[in-house]
Amino acid sequence: MPWPTGLKSLPPEPGIFGKTEREMQEAFLAEIDRIPGGERLRRCIQCGTCTGSCPVSYAMDLTPREVVAYFRAGAIDMILRSRTIWVCASCYQCTTRCPAGIKITDLLYALKRVGFDQRLFPQKFPVYVMSETFVGQIKKYGRNHEAELLRKYFLKTGVMRMIKQVPLALRLFRKGRIKLTASKIRGIEGLRKMIARAEQLDEPRLVEEVQPLTRAVGYQAIG
Amino acid sequence: MEYSYYPGCSLHATGVAYDKSMQATFKALDAGLIELDDWNCCGATAYMSVKETVAFTVSARNLALAERAGRDIVTPCSACWCVLNKTRTYMRKLPELRRHVEESLREAGMTCKFDLPVRHPLEVLVNDFGIAQLASRQVRSLKGLRVACYYGCQIVRPERALEEEDQEVPMALENLLAGLGATPVPFSPKVRCCGGMLVATFESVARELTGRLVEWARVEGADCIATTCPLCQANLEVLQEGGNGEGTAKPPIPAVYFTQLVGMALGCSEREVGLHHNMIPLKFEFPRMAKPTTRHPPLSPLGKGGNRGVAEPAPTTEAASNV
């Protein structure tokens, strides 16, 4: 799928997408503060372990290391215009290996949420359509019915893509792996109430205390 | 032993073989798997991209249901395991988020203490039953089956399904299958991502990632890849066949669930473990054994890591004459 080169009507000066830079920055910083360990971003030493570990970094325009660098430079708009946050498979390899303990995957999740909230994606964007359809399924049935999820997803992102999937779908069906019937869970009303309430609640600030480095470092460490 | 069984949405559809092999394996071990009543979708990775508190709430409902049932939760789908476990961990670590989630749960009259552990069948088999017990109940041989043990991301990162295992080079599945007489091959990308949901959103990227896994398995001469996650298994099959049924130049490598292998070893039939659901058939006889095997020593001590697949696990002389 060719990556769309431009999002609709990009104004040349700072007020990108019609929102002020400041608004976006504030939304983003508020989001980042909510991730546990968000403050650790200050400790990034740009070692590049995250990029080296990332299995999809080859498909990114801004690598994970660069995302952290851009964030610290305040260039939020560059991050939100990049492909990175959408291609991330959330495999957590970067988070596991980061020597500074930065939770990069959670950072990219926060970025995805900002991207969705601020509508910073083109029309029929697969990642958005997938998430929305997925959520729709949960609100409708309480469970995901794969056949319906994929049917709706492909219909919304391009009928041609759906038609190309038909042979595969038939083979899966012949192997007994497609469930055609959909049914709601008994507690669907309760689930909907829970979701409605949770949507109303503000996202809490998840500030994790970052311990100061008390060990001697550098020349102090070797006396 | 009894467990609350959380299958997840996938296991009633594309992952039906995992569901069947789970039930068959646990039945063969005389363990009870009681499906969690009225469970809902865990939310997977998709909900977390939309709204955080809601995602945790949706997942927490299952933990509340499990608490009512009072048994440990076992969930085979690695993604579900990751989400449910992450919910439990975050609820215990972050009081403000917990307050919001508890308030949302109360809307449906539910509460949860988030004490009950969320477990994966690999960990349950290894810890609650033990490789020795499985080997003593083994009636079908896995000897000669070269298997690439693929853990995927979710049961080793960010949290471990098996407490002592190395996050980079786990060996529990290799030890388990070696203990049943199979031959695990060295498989370096055993914890690399298969692409997951990218198969729907960025198919070429998922194709590249699974391609790397399959190539490595092929180079090591694996007969099959044993997986722990329904999405990994689906990706490995679907993306290997050139997509939509076009044949590939090299013979495809079947992707099976590790519970299918364990179930067969414990005496279940091919239909009981759902081998007929696999798109790339596994060509292996699973011959009956004369007597139960004695336990093979593990390839490496649990928790010490290591990537040495040996050509043949060292058998004792008694086992060599039995098999």
Image (spheres, coloured by chain):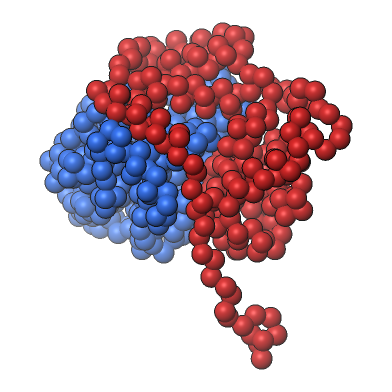
In the drawing, does residue B186 fall left or right of residue A190? right
Count of labels in the image: 0
Q: Which residue is most to the right? A: A12
Residue at the image position 31 percent from the left and 38 percent from the top: B105
Residue A145: x and y in percent read 38, 20
x and y percentages locating residue B316 in the rendered image: 25, 58
Q: Residue B16 occupies which quadrant of the picture?
A: top left
Locate residue A167, reporting x and y percent.
Answer: 51, 10
Q: Is residue B61 above or below residue B88?
A: above
Q: Residue at x 34, y 29 (%)?
A: A193
Q: Nearer the viewer, residue B264 or B313?
A: B264
Chain B visual colour: blue
Q: Is residue B58 left or right of residue B321?
A: right
Q: Nearer the viewer, residue B176 or A213?
A: A213
Q: Is residue B289 above or below residue B242?
A: below
Q: Is residue A15 left or right of residue B93?
A: right
Q: Quadrant of the C terminus of chain B?
A: top left
The residue at the point 67 percent across, 19 percent down is A123
A168 vs A104, nearest the viewer: A104
- In the image, B182: left or right of A116? left
Q: Compared with residue B187, is residue A20 higher up or lower down, i.e. above or below?
A: above
Foreground residue among A110 and B157: A110
As drawn, the residue found furthest toward the bottom would be A223
Residue found at x 41% / y 36%? A198
Camera sees residue B293: no
| Residue B95 visible in image | yes
Question: Residue A163: x, y in percent?
Answer: 56, 8
Chain shaded red: A
